Each structure stands twice: as C-alpha cells, then as structure tokens.
Image: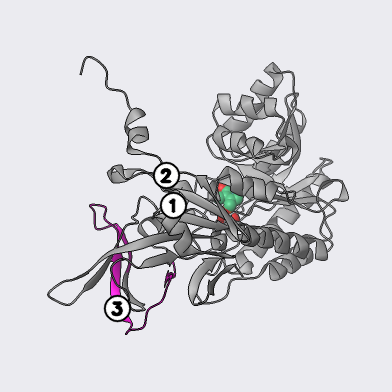
Amino acid sequence: MNFFEPIDGELACEGVRLTEIAQAVGTPVYVYSSATLERHYTVLTDALVGQGLKGRDGAAPLIAFAVKANSNLAVLKTLARLGAGADTVSEGEIRRALAAGIPAERIVFSGVGKTAQEIEFALKAGVSEINVESEPEMHLISTIAQRLGLRAPIALRVNPDVSAGGHAKIATGKSDNKFGVSISEAERLYAQASNNAGLNPVGVTCHIGSQITDLAPLEAAFAKMARLVARLRADGLSVERLDLGGGLGVPYFDQPEPATPADYAAMIARTLGDLDIALSFEPGRMIAANAGVLLAKVLHIHERPEGRKFVVLDAAMNDLIRPAMYDAYHDLRPVRPRPGPADTYDVVGPVCETGDTFTRDRRLPSLEAGDLVAFMSAGAYGAVMASEYNSRLLVPEVLVRGDQFAIVRPRPTYEDMLAREVVPDWV
Ligand SMILES: *Cc1c(COP(=O)(O)O)cnc(C)c1O
C-alpha cells in the first residue's frame, strides 16, 4: 500500500499534487512519501512483534534500513524517528546514518570489501556490529581493533548456498557469488574469533538476494542458519544475534503478489521462533520502493515510418537505471490522464545509447508532449544510483508529508557541475 493516489483525477503524493511539485522543482524529480515510508516500517515491525519475535534485550527486533536503497538524509531521519537502525556498506553510509540521527548502536556495517580506513572509522564510531564477509577481512578487523584497544563486535556473514530466483545481478546467496563464507567455514571462523583478543563474535548473518517474492528460499536459508546457531552453541560458543538480511520483494506490477510482511513474520516465527536469539533485519526495498516515484515530462511523441511509437521523456537512464541494468519493470502513470485512446509505445530517455529505454511495447493511456508521467515504485535503488552521464544534472529529490513538501536534495546548477572539476595548468 502507498500514498500515491489521485486527487480530483490528478496523481498526488499524500496531499500534494505532483503537478505542483513539477512546477516548483522542474522535472525529472524523485518524490517520496513520508507516510508510506512510515507505514512500511511500522507494518514490518508490528508483524514481527505480533509473532512474539524479539531483538536485543527483549525489545522489538532491530530494523536496520539498508541505506544503499535510499540514502537521502531526510528519508533516513524519517525512519530514525521511528526507531530504525541502518545497514551500511561504506564509511559514507555510516556517516549518513549518524548525520540522520541514527545512533551507532543501531548501525550495522556490511559489505564485501571494507577498507582498513573504513573499519577503523566504524570501530571508533562504535557501530553495533561489523558483518564479516571473509577470513582475511576478519583478521584485518582483529588487527585494527587490537591496535585501537577494542574488541570488535562482529557477525559472520554466512552464504547459505540457496538460490533465491530473481535477477542474477541481485542474487547473493549462492556459493559461487562473492558474498559471505560457507556454513562449514563459519563454524571454524566463529570458534577462531571467540579466541581472538580483537574480536567479539556476537552472531551470524545472511542475506540471499533482493526482490525475493517467494518465501521458500528465505525459509530454506533461515532453517540452515538455525541449525548453524544450534551447532555453534552446542560447541559452547555464545551466539546472541541473528541478522536475517533484507530482500523481501515488492509488487512492481500486479503480477504474483509478493509475500506480505505478515507471511514473512509467520514464517520466521515457525523457523526460528524457538531459538531464543536477538533478531535483526536489513530491509531496503520493502521500506522505500513504493514510497517514491520518479516524475518526468513527455518531450515528444515520435512515430517512426514503420509504425513504432516512442515516448521521449526528459528523464533518462542516468536518473533511473533499473530498467537498463536489471530489466526492471516500473509502472508508468500519466499524472493527469487525458481522454483518448491507449496506444503501444517504447518509452525512452534522451541519453545517447539504445540502453536508455525504460520499456518497449508498453500499452499506455493517451499521452501528448508536455504531459507529466510518474514511474511508480522508484523510491529504492533509484536516486541513489543516479549519475550525471551525458552531463545531465543530478536528479533532485523531494519529500512530502501531508500537504507540505520540501526539496531534500536540490538540483545542482551547471556551474556547480563544472566547478567540481580541475584542469591542471599543464593541459
Ligand atoms: C542490499 C542489501 C540489503 C537490502 O536488500 P533489499 O532487497 O533492498 O531489502 C540488506 N542487506 C545487505 C547485506 C545488502 O547487501
């Protein structure tokens, strides 16, 4: 459910018409709904708590929002106010989470290739846990922690070797991809970490991929994690926390409904409910995707002699790369639907490559030059992946709450863009 509904026949975000935002800010622009972000966070938390699932110290499980899905400070702060933590994958993301008011004890530091500088930064900041992806990384963390006179709280990221379906570029849970250590390595490394002066192993973690709409692979992975925890404990090791990653998918169109948070929570209760362990989660997409749209304007309708019709937008692959990169589908809605026949279009942006195609052969309502359209479900992995390719200005972001909106990342000027570069005097 989201809060992008028409007001008097015109698409709005909560109480603000998208036309008003387009007039004030220009297009393309991302628009986020506070109420939708809050609702997704609350629905997930309530579902988990409703199943009696617990986090640390008997509190609700930690929901560490995956900052990589949407790292805008205003979005992070919206979630922070509800008690969200942050799952981060770089020093930049840790800094963003802290700047948004997320306390270090709710920040998790994940990622396959953390640098020594990043690890030191995370330890000094006091993050709640560093999720370790490999044996060399574990040794590096230990060395840095001992130099700082600390014991680094770590969780071992386990690759449970489960195939989750979905797009190959976002599947992470098979043994042949780069993430995490195998279950048997995890047993050896966890024991090693327990005897290491620089390490405090607090738990284990897994994340098998993104946009997973079927619970079966998640359940298979979680069952393997439960058995791993039991074996570690049987060996006398303390395992306080289990971080179950993110990955639950969202409906990008009305095809097979993804599993709901309630189904997800029930599955976890049945798989892990008896484990007596502090659970945490790292959802990104399920919190943010349906809380944002990319608003764009139709520049031209271009019809080729052989009959193919192109809708040329002022948004391009540099603003929203998911269709080009993952063959992703985004529902595309006119902001002010006009009477007239539907037609079949290719929807493209102005960037000089054929990859800059949002969709082909899409049946769309009547459109004319100057119309506003909204790419739905663009709040996750949208603005964060934007670039200035073709020297197009970085796309701005707007946050709506009720009947007010604010620009939360302004569109830079061309002067800003040029001023960042340096031409040495020997050129
Ligand atoms: C990307 C990622 C997430 C978030 O994935 P979603 O599909 O957006 O929920 C969580 N944890 C880790 C380690 C990730 O890499």
Residue type at mark 2: give it. Arg
Secondary element type, mark 3: strand
**Circle 3 or circle 1, nearest the eye:** 1
Q: CA distance from mark 3 to mark 1?
A: 30 Å
Q: CA distance from mark 2 to mark 3?
A: 32 Å
Direction from residue 275 to residue 325 in the image, left or right: left
Task: Mark 2 and ligand 1: say if the CB distance to the nearest ligand atom is below 8 Å.
Answer: no
**Circle 2 or circle 1, nearest the eye:** 1
297 in relation to 57, above or below: below
> Badge 2 is on which residue?
411
Residue type at mark 1: give it. Val
Q: Is residue 277 visible?
A: yes
**Circle 2 or circle 3, nearest the eye:** 2
**Residue under the image location 38 percent in, 66 percent down:** 372
| Numbered label tally | 3
Task: Pinpoint residue 265: horizontal percent, then vertical percent.
Answer: 73, 65
